[in-house]
Amino acid sequence: MCYQSVKRVRNFPRLMDAVTRLTSPPQPERHRHRRHAMTAALVAILATLAACGGTTSTQSDAQIALNDLNAGLSAQAAGRLSDAATDYKNAISHDAHNKFAYYDLGLIQQLMGQAVASEQNYRAAIQIDPNFTAALYNLAILRTVPSPAEAEALYRHVISLQPKNAAAHPQPRVPVALREQDR
């Protein structure tokens, strides 16, 4: 039960009388104590429900995942990377097909220097959406040193999807004459 914001009612007997009059027909005086007990129980239940925000939640897993994803984005923006990672993992546990949760978790892990875990999450996002350019691009960055051929293929795929994506195009090289001049 949720008791966090239940406040004491100032004039509880008067509240019980008002609720009793509204919820039950007049009865003989001998049943009054029973009515008060039932009314007290009803008021306690209503107060608890009001303090908890209503009845139990009926949110779908997708909605819970979206809430976790938004919480992760907020934590990430505030610089709380470990909290963001936890939120993204929670989102994945509620929606295993959420490419954004995998991508954002991969990004956090990449920022934290966890290249292997980051690569796994980028690959999971790409498995869900093979044309997810942000995940393809970041995976290409991770694969540049250990597998230049794979990185090149990933960059080419990004370019085929977004020809104007300047970041995915090879950087212009310094002319050979200038490099030799600096020696």
Image (cartoon, grey):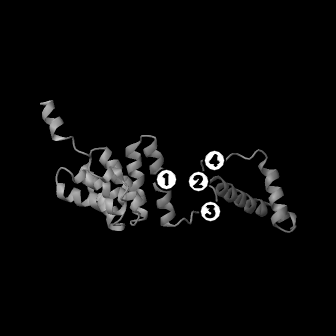
Task: Specify which label sits upstream in the sequence, 3 or 1.
Answer: 3
Is 171 rendered above or below residue 18?
above
State the mark number for residue 2: 2
Quarter of the view holding residue 40: bottom right
Secondary structure beneath disc 2?
loop
| Front label number (3 vs 1) | 1
Secondary structure beneath disc 3?
loop
State the mark number for residue 70: 1
At which x and y percent is residue 28? Answer: 87, 67
Secondary structure beneath disc 1?
helix
Task: Specify which label sits upstream in the sequence, 4 or 1.
Answer: 4
The amino acid type, in three-letter code, at marker 1 is: Asn
At which x and y percent is residue 100? Answer: 41, 58
The amino acid type, in three-letter code, at marker 3 is: Thr
Mark 2 vs 4: CB contact within 8 A:
yes
Q: Which residue is mark 4?
A: 5
Residue at 38% from the left image edge and 65% from the top image edge? 96
Nearest the viewer among 153 and 6 is 153
| Front label number (2 vs 1) | 1
State the mark number for residue 124: none
Residue at 32% from the left image edge and 59% from the top image edge? 159
Q: Which residue is mark 3?
A: 55
Say few, some or many: other residues with alpha carbon within 10 Å of mark 1 (under 14 / 14 to 19 / 20 or more): some
The amino acid type, in three-letter code, at marker 4 is: Ser
